[in-house]
Amino acid sequence: MKFKKLEFTNAAGQKLSARLDLPSDDKPSAYALFAHCFTCSKNIKAISHISRALTRNGIAVMRFDFTGLGESEGDFADTNFTSNVGDLVVAAEFMAINHAAPKILIGHSLGGAAVLQAAAKIPSAAAVITVAAPADPGHVTRALGDTKDIIERRGEANVNLAGRTFKIKKQFLDDLESVPMQQTIRNLNRALLIFHSPADGVVGIENAAKIFQIARHPKSFISLDTADHLLMNPKDSQYVGALIAVWAMKYIEKENLR
């Protein structure tokens, strides 16, 4: 898999680190933009496997670290769901200027909720894919446990998530509560593909059911059987990538005929 290291500037003037994965012939049939999960980075194994499967099918993929995460500048404590959506919109604009506008938006976990929200501001997108996404971004507060109450009282707190400590401020919680997710899903106006595992212990499969019920056609759901939330088994993420490539091209080709 060929790739290029990239860097673009977010709305606050901070440098965000990105990577563009390319097909071996350097002639992509389409470009995809990938949003990683909460507190993750562009380099987690699941994203790499999905990206590899897509490039094998001629689809280029740009993945990047949200503000304050991975190799990107900024303070994570000052970010929120809305700023993540803003990062996605800026990333799509960067792609349009320097490569090609993304026809495919893919999001994992909270990144899935972010691409649903960002799609309305990315007119080039013809297809949206969520993987293990919550139906409401507020779901992420469950990972905070009792610390949520401390944040509400004190205005901020350090939270241990997957072995790493992050400072989370009350503005993060307030922002999550302000997102009109049901309206966003209902008015998506894009082809939607939902991946979720009934064995997901982090974001329950009822979230996929809710997204599917609210969304309008065209929409599809694919069960990931025994996969865990982070798709730790490479076979699961490779499967996701291969199916996205086949499914998305139908809608991209339809868009190209207009």
Image: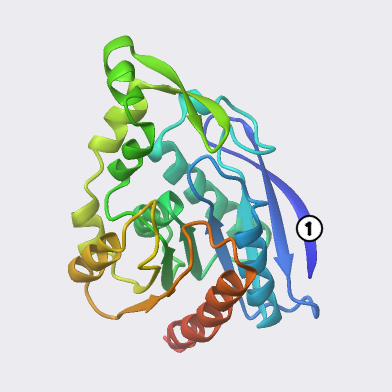
Could you tell me which residue is drawn at 32 percent across and 36 percent down? Answer: 141
Q: Is residue 86 visible?
A: yes
Q: Nearer the viewer, residue 20 or 100?
A: 20
* Other residues around mark 1 within 10 Å, as few (<14) / some (14–19) / many (≥20): few
Which quadrant of the structure image shows residue 191? bottom left
**Quadrant of the drawing holding the C terminus:** bottom left
Q: Give the vertical position of 138 relative to 148 (above or below).
A: below
Q: Is residue 187 visible?
A: no
**Count of labels shown?**
1
**Quadrant of the drawing holding the N terminus:** bottom right
Left/right of residue 162 with respect to residue 135 in the rendered view: right
- Relative image position of residue 15 (x, y in whole percent): 66, 35
For badge 1, the amino acid type reads Lys
Q: Nearer the viewer, residue 100 or 78?
A: 78
Q: Give the vertical position of 179 relative to 257 (above or below).
A: above
Furthest toward the top, the residue is 154
- Relative image position of residue 120 (x, y in whole percent): 34, 58
Left/right of residue 203 with respect to residue 182 in the rendered view: right
Q: Nearer the viewer, residue 236 or 24?
A: 236
Which quadrant of the structure image shows residue 4? bottom right
Q: Name the colouring of the figure.
A: rainbow
Could you tell me which residue is drawn at 64 percent across and 69 percent down? Answer: 234
Look at the numbered disc 1 and give the secondary structure of its residue: strand
Residue placed under numbered mark 1 in the picture: 4
Q: Nearer the viewer, residue 16 or 202?
A: 202
